[in-house]
Image (cartoon, grey):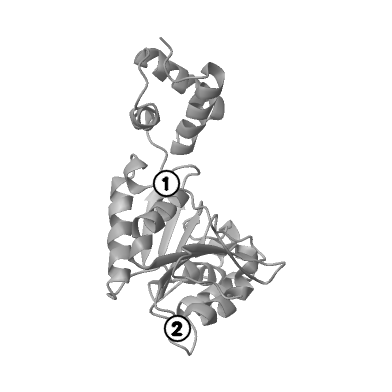
Amino acid sequence: MAINWSNIYAAIWRQQKNKLRPIDTIDPVNLQTLIGIEEQKQALVRNTQRFLDNQPANNALLWGARGTGKSSLIKAILNNYKDKNLRLIEIFKNDLHNLFDIVDEIRELPQKFIIYCDDFSFDENETTYRVLKTVLDGSIEQPPENIILYATSNRRHLMPEKMQDNLDSKLVDGDLHYSDTIEDKISLSDRFGLWLSFYQPNQEGYLQIVDSYFSDYTGNRNELHEAAKKFSMSRASRSGRTARQFYNHYYQQNGKLDSS
């Protein structure tokens, strides 16, 4: 049965069933709760608004350190615009060969769709990324105007780079000519017109995120911060994800947020 996109806001591709599964309960994250990534939020909001307004907009690659809000930002974009005809379809990289069929299914619909690929990177010998290159900008058929791709990755160029790739590059008449391997790798990331970089915050930024989770906390704030710093050290991370994990850890240990 086809999905009724008038009241379904998101779906995920299920390879075993070879179909899209509607998502009934969407992660409720919203733009206001995402702290420390204001520039990235503004850029993706502008791009999404242009997409909804039928103006030129870019496929977006959100890349950088783990746990810094890349996936949360895309989900927040959906929650912010789902009442304005925006929909989201999540597909895993191993299922990209099904992307042509998904696009054919939704290209004539009145809704606007984000194709969402999380943790998007490829190993050296993988070739499924070539399907994506074709869908984005390499087919004889014009890309659908109601579809845009938002992907997250820990790698800027999506694929691992090796020293040998650079050794195969050469200078010709003073111009640098990349090796075929590097050209192939760069050609994929170049199809994303909007690159947004994410970095782990400094300690002050991390504590601001912690405070956003503990907005109703009435105990000793300095003691809370010390506990949060120790927790981040044990995880070797000061990301927004770490702040959320600390919140859950503190709540489990204390049973309530008020330590007084």
Q: Measured from the top left, where is residue 180 in percent x and y?
A: 55, 73
Q: Secondary structure at mark 1?
A: loop
Q: Residue at x 53, y 82 (%)?
A: 104
Q: CA distance from mark 1 to mark 2?
A: 29 Å
Query: Where residue 6 is drawn, which disc sits there?
Result: none
Residue 231: percent from left, percent from top = 51, 23
Q: Is residue 2 above or below residue 38?
A: below
Q: Quadrant of the N terminus?
A: bottom right
Crowdedness near tag 2: few (<14), some (14–19) or many (≥20) residues, C-alpha within 10 Å: few
When the figure is inspected, residue 192 is found, relative to residue 213, above or below; the finding is below
Residue 46 in the image: x percent, y percent? 27, 61
Q: What's under tag 2, amino acid-wise?
A: Glu
Left or right of residue 97: residue 198: left
Quadrant where the C terminus is found in the figure: top left
Query: Residue 14's x, y, as percent?
Result: 65, 65
* Residue 109 placement, left or right of 255: left
From this viewpoint, is residue 39 visible? yes
- The amino acid pointed to by label 1 is Val
Determine the secondary structure under disc 2.
Answer: loop
Q: Which mark is residue 29?
A: 1
What residue does disc 2 label? 108
Residue 84's image quarter? bottom left
Image height of 78 relative to 146, above or below: above
Residue toward you, 106 or 162 = 106
Q: What residue occupies the far right of the structure in this picture? A: 16
**Disc nearer the start of the sequence (1/2):** 1
Extreme residue toward the bottom, this view: 140
In this orientation, does residue 178 appear?
no
